[in-house]
Image: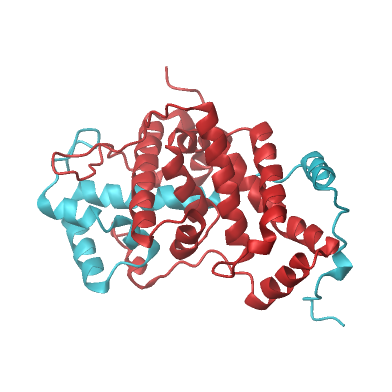
């Protein structure tokens, strides 16, 4: 295994597969390319690390807690827009209860 | 476990992260909005304010500017609702207005934008990863602890606004590639290209951060 902290001498194959990295992580890479990429990863340690950490990076950002709109900001927004807060009973009932 | 075992399912998986507003819901709401129904305006705000604030905060990086972007977005939307065309959903239209407002604010603050996020490129233009620390094996509680989350947010702030907008809409807000393209008035291929560059840049930053071990040494920053 190569030193994980040193630069990787990318082969032509490595670069070709890296082009499809986003599609691979999103599950939209063509099946043939997908199989080729996975076969390549089985023999190229650094590309395996790049693919795994690329995928993990996207996953971590998906898990990042979403900031909530503070009540004070919401109140000022309605004031600026000169609106009365939306009354929920006007919304369609999606609970299945009539 | 074989190295690729976790990833092999990617071949057959298509990630859909966000349900679209139903067309009929949008149609009814737009009709009421264009008729000047005040409760429709309030409904539009109630259904979208949270996500627009989230987008604004990720784009501009501070609460005061995010609040301004939020207000500008709805003021602008109210003014231009008569010109709304149903090429995109209402929420995508609002994302577009909000992103433009955020980008305008960033340009005013940083008129000379120096991009620090461009990935390293080879002579023939390929993007070349430089960090090979495999942080996937770190405990989940280390990866998602508060300090790591702050680093993740800082890494977003370091992206150029053009990459940041694509990444936030696609990977944080969960829009599809097409919806992101619609919101930013970009081609699908441009969205994919920018998303790839943003993700590569963030991967580099996180790899470097985790390789220095702050999250597994009681949260101390590396010296």
Residue B108 appears at what percent x and percent y? 54, 30
Viewed as shown, does residue A3 lie left or right of B210? left
What colour is chain A? cyan
What colour is chain B? red
Q: Is residue B151 above or below residue A12?
A: above
Residue at the image position 81 percent from the left and 43 percent from the top = A80
Viewed as shown, does residue B175 lie left or right of B46? left
Residue B30 appears at what percent x and percent y? 71, 69
Judge by depth and name the residue closer to the eye, B106 or B77.
B77
Q: Within the image, what quadrant is residue A1 found in?
A: top left
Q: Within the image, what quadrant is residue B43 found in?
A: bottom right
Residue at the image position 47 percent from the left and 27 percent from the top = B111
Residue at the image position 59 percent from the left and 59 percent from the top = B93
Considering every residue shown, the one lying at the far left of the view is A12
Residue at the image position 82 percent from the left and 47 percent from the top = A78
Q: Is residue B114 above or below residue B43?
A: above
Considering every residue shown, the one lying at the far top of the view is B223
Judge by depth and name the residue closer to the eye, B32 or A70.
B32
């Amino acid at each position: 295994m190569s030193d994980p902290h040193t630069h990787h001498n990318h082969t032509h194959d490595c670069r070709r597969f890296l082009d499809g990295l986003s599609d691979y992580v999103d599950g939209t890479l063509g099946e043939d390319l997908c199989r080729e990429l996975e076969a390549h990863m089985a023999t190229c340690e650094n590309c395996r690390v790049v693919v795994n950490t690329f995928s993990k990076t996207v996953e971590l950002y998906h898990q990042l807690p979403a900031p909530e709109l503070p009540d004070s900001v919401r109140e000022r927004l309605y004031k600026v827009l000169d609106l009365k807060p939306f009354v929920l009973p006007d919304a369609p009932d999606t609970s299945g209860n009539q | 476990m074989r190295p690729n075992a976790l990833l092999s399912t990617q071949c057959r998986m298509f990630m859909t992260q966000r349900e679209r507003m139903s067309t009929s819901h949008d149609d009814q709401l737009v009709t009421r909005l264009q008729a000047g129904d005040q409760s429709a305006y309030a409904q539009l705000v109630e259904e979208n304010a949270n996500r627009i604030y989230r987008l604004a905060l990720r784009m501009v990086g501070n609460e005061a500017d995010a609040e301004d972007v939020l207000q500008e977005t709805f003021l602008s939307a109210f003014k231009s609702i008569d010109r709304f065309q149903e090429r995109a959903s209402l929420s995508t239209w609002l994302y577009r207005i909000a992103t433009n407002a955020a980008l305008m604010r960033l340009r005013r603050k940083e008129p000379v934008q120096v991009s620090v996020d461009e990935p390293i490129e080879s002579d023939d233009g390929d993007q070349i990863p430089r960090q090979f620390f495999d942080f996937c094996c770190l405990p989940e509680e280390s990866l998602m602890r508060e300090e790591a989350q702050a680093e993740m947010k800082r890494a977003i702030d370091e992206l150029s606004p053009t990459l940041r907008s694509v990444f936030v809409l696609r990977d944080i807000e969960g829009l599809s590639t097409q919806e992101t393209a619609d919101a930013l008035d970009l081609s699908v291929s441009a969205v994919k290209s920018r998303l790839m560059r943003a993700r590569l840049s963030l991967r580099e930053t996180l790899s470097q951060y985790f390789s220095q071990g702050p999250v597994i040494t009681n949260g101390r920053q590396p010296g």
